[in-house]
Amino acid sequence: MDISVVSLIASLIVAATPILLAATGELIVEKSGVLNLGVEGMMIMGAICGFIAAVNSGSPFVGFCIAAISGAILSLLFAILTQYLLANQVASGLALTLFGLGLAALLGHSYSGIKPPSSPKFEWFGMSDISIIGPIIFNHDLMVYFSVFLVLIVWIFLKFTRAGLILRAVGENHDAAHALGYKVIRIRVLAIMFGGACAGLGGAYLSLIRVPQWTEGMTAGAGWIALAIVVFASWKPWRLILGAYLFGGVTILQLNLQANGFAIPVSYLSMAPYLVTIVVLVIMSADRTRASVNAPASLGKIFHASS
Amino acid sequence: MMRLEPRTDPSNIMIGLTPILAVLATMIFGGLLFVFLGKNPFDAIRMIFWDPLLGEHAFYYRGQILVKAAPLIMIALGLSFGFRAGIWNIGAEGQFIMGAVIGGATGLALYPMDSFIVFPLMILMGSIGGLLWGLIPAYLKIKFNANEILVSLMLVYVAFNFLVGMVTGPLRNPDGFNFPESRSFQDFPSAHNPELWSGTGIHWGVLVTLGIVIMAYIAITRHIFGFNVRLAGQAPRAAKFAGVNPNKMIAICLGLSGALAGMAGLFELTGPAGKLTTTFPVGYGFTAIIVAFLGRLHPIGILFAGLLLAVTYVGGDIIQSQLSLPKASIQVFQGMLLFFLLAVDVLVNFKIRIGKRITK
């Protein structure tokens, strides 16, 4: 068996990035007290819209922008349903996923088998030549660094800004936040749209860089895994990176074992990322008091000002 | 200004009316979608909703409607109990697959035994397969507080990979030139689930589904279990005081929906699908979620919702072949239906008031 640790770590970062992007967005959504189960649907819409835009414009950058916009627009549907029409968040999230998967398949009908324009590696002024650290850290495309940067921004936002404090207040107790005069609905709609944009970026990363091509249903549960990683991270931004990279590691390891003709059949190895997600979820949820302290108190509850 | 005013009691008229409103809204916006795709919307809507029932070739399609409605209704009935109690099993697709694999494997192990016992045994094993697969998220929820939504969904992917492993390994047809598929159940009479009356589409699964609709109706309206389920969903604390054990509720709801999904999978495998292949799962487990909501989580409602969604499936096949539209367009249609249903649902518990708020 020939598995190089350096290339393994470098590729696990790439495998983790789409999930890290989507999970960062969902973290903000859940911190505002909304559970959006439509991540999978928004991701796949981002994947196909970003792909179409990148292929037609020849620019991956345009692709990512369009992907973020399309994710945000789709999430707006969820926002209208849950915030203005007071629909059940679980059901609405599922609807978003089913709708997104269908719409993406429809849009992508004539786009399978095409190669997207390639995204250049970010230029670190020769630092990619440093042994070991170079290929692992300094030899990626811009989106990998952006995803980590986004986690940093979200952390600063939640921990050190007034707006972040208000967002958390809305998520912990929407009635109290409303009584203080904060616009609960407006804040939540903005949070949901941020989540949609991030999920869209994550999806586009899959179709433009990670795979890179369009196939129907290509997210294969990545959106759901992003949701699980938010739980794993106990709603703390930095732990998202740990969770996403752990997941990326499992994915890459099983792919490498497959490629090296390991004795276990491919289909059983392919189960690994999903099984690991379940195990991680179980470990993180088992301590009930800690889980309930970390989760936003108003998560998934419907807010209506009259009551 | 428009605003929402809570009703003191949910409106019974709206409970019945909102699914119809949702279907109408879906037709209108679905029509716009077809315009966008460059097709005549009236033709498309007619092909989806009219042709399968009353069109020129409807005699063929009507049977197909029952074939597709049966698994949708059976799965949705199981899900409806959990959804009422606030227990979200969204991994019915996985339980459907496991039922088919476990039940199918039982049958294949007995090949070519000629006995009336084979088929009932397969149904039993299929249900047990689905039951056990459904109990995994239940156990993890009860014991470790793990979110059943995410666990049951993850298990769909595990089940699918298990299916692939089985049809490329132990369950591959030994006389089948190495194709990744099992022996055909059509060539195994004592395990076959045939069309009982030619042209009707009715197989054993359809009859069992009807029986389960009646049983579910009795359970939810007449039996203490149905009462407890509704209580647990609407007032969890009151349910606790009434002696409803929430853990038991989780196990029963997830196990029951798993067993029914597994049974649906077995009937589908031995009848319409015919053999285990990697393309065996077609998403009934996910569409059944739409069926359950559209049917208002009520057995009779689910019966009609299942038939309607089956019509759109058959209609989807028609537009696919006649208007050369991709298969996914019908999926968009079904997703839209759930969206509109959730949107108009607000009318059940709220009144729309136009004008300024009257200060008390």
Image: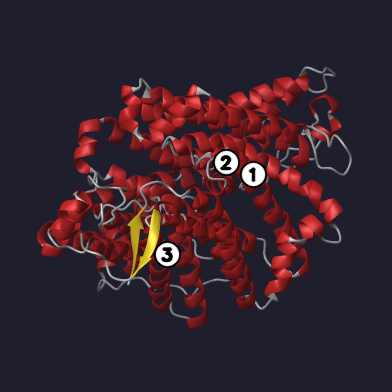
Label 3 to label 1: alpha-carbon separation: 29 Å
Image quarter for residue B270? Answer: top right
Q: Nearer the viewer, residue B238 or A93?
A: B238
Q: Is residue B135 visible?
A: no
* Vertical order, B192 against B290 (above or below): above
Q: Which residue lies under the disc numbered 2?
A: B93
Q: Which mark is residue B281?
A: 1
Q: Are marks 3 and 1 on the same chain?
A: no
Tell me residue B22's x, y (percent).
Answer: 55, 59
Residue at x 37%, y 34% (from the top left corner)? A279
- Where is residue B242? Give x, y as percent: 35, 22
What's the mark number on residue A77?
Answer: 3
- Distance of label 2 from label 1 (alpha carbons): 7 Å
- What residue is rendered at 20% in x and 55% in y? A170
| Local secondary structure at mark 2 | helix
The residue carrying pointer 3 sits among few (fewer than 14), some (14 to 19) or many (20 or more) residues within 10 Å by Cα, namely: some
| Residue B172 in which image quadrant | top right
Residues tagged by mark 3 and mark 2 found on one chain of the structure: no
Q: Position of residue B90 (x, y in %)?
A: 49, 42
Q: Chain of mark 2?
A: B
Q: Secondary structure at mark 1?
A: loop
Q: Give the class, few, some or many, for how many residues have Cα within 10 Å of label 2's Cα (few <14, many ≥20).
A: many
From the top left corner, tell me how far across and down residue A38 is, in percent: 43, 55
The disc, 2 or 1, on the residue closer to the chain's N-terminal end is: 2
Residue drawn at x 47%, y 51% as measured from the top left:
A94
Q: CA distance from mark 3 to mark 2?
A: 25 Å
Q: Going by the picture, which residue comes out furthest to the right?
A: B198
Which residue is at the front of the view, A271 or B298?
Answer: B298
Query: Most extreme residue toward the bottom, as rendered?
Result: A57
